[in-house]
Image: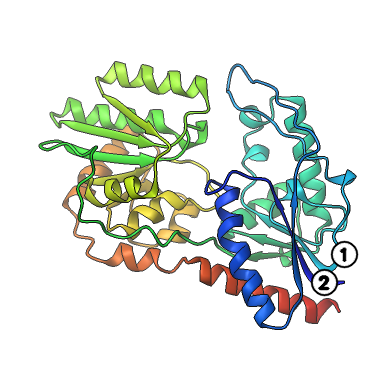
Amino acid sequence: MDDIAIITGKWRTGVGHGSFAGNLIPRVCALARHAGLSVSVHEIKPLFELNIAKRKIGGYSTIWPVRCLKHPKAKIVHALDAGVATSNTNVVTLLDIAPLVFPEIYLRSFTAKVEWNYRKKVLLKARKILSISAFSGQECASVIGIERKKIEVCPLGLESSFYPDNAVSEYWRKGKINIVTSGQNDPRKNFPVLIEALGVLKEKGYDINFVRFGPSNWPEETRKMQETARRYGITLVEPGVVDIEVLRRAYSSFDVFVWPSIYEGMGLPPLEALACGAKVVALDLPFNREFMGDVAVYVKNEPGAIAEGILEALKMEIGDKGIKQAKKYTWERCASQHLKIYLDLLKAWF
């Protein structure tokens, strides 16, 4: 029997869960083996996938038939997501519980409801939950009813490829206020309100260049963004998913990075922007302050307030404060925290 078994899914490399697993697993396995622990990794591949198009909001649901699979034998069985947990899983990583907070957005299909009912049971049964933020841990406790003593905060890390770049982004435009953001056009990312804020600035005479990086998987939200942009005369530039080098140049050379998201476990894009020396404007919400401290400009979720925040950011001198803040979150630190938790649990449980 191994000391530790890590369960991961067949996720897209470099994106979301795929980035998390790809960065954490090799590092934590190396540390664990160096500490004399036996560790195994199990990638769960779905025996089947049930994809149901959601005409109103886009996307699809995947059912992971994990109960049908052979359970790894180990003292600690750590699932990197509740959706891939086996029945003998005793440690689970929690990113966020957005679908339970916004069921009208995420739980509109039968398969999504079944999946999240399973996830709730996994979280309730687990002996330890590793939350990527204090905010997600608090949400898990209050919404699902998890005992707070079961939850431990273990933040994610940033890719080391994010740092100040002297090369000017191909999307930067001379003589304009260059505004950048990133993330998929999920409704909770709140991009239409950001576009309204840019419209407020345009009405005041400012010339705006706005670029959003990231996938567009929500057709209804795409329409909202396009309609809002047309109404305010804002040109919407959306290159889609791009290489880190493209993001790094944009974050480094644009005037302001704006993060209008209303709900996150741990929002990595604004931290990535800070790592590149960018000025960041974000909504005044707990998950933002938890990770960005006092280096961002915080505003209310109103177009006028966001517009004023952008103007304030343009005048501020950030120096290297943002870079230092972002450097607190590395994958090496994340892996070290995981190892310490594993060692503590082995000592307490066995």
- Determine the secondary structure under disc 2: strand
Query: 268 above or below 59?
Result: below
For the C terminus, give its image quadrant: bottom right
The image quarter containing residue 22 is: bottom right
Q: Is residue 118 left or right of residue 156?
A: right
Residue 339 position, x and y percent, is 65, 74
- Determine the secondary structure under disc 1: loop
The image quarter containing residue 254 is: top left
Task: Residue at 29%, 66% (x, y): give it.
Answer: 321
Compute the Cα span from label 1 to label 2: 7 Å
Q: Amino acid at mark 2?
A: Asp
Q: Which residue is mark 2?
A: 2
For the N terminus, give its image quadrant: bottom right
Q: Which mark is residue 73?
A: 1
For residue 104, say whether it is visible.
yes
Q: Is residue 154 left or right of residue 33?
A: left
Query: 201 above or below 158?
Result: above
For residue 298, say whether it is visible.
no
Task: Residue at 87%, 48% (x, y): give it.
Answer: 69
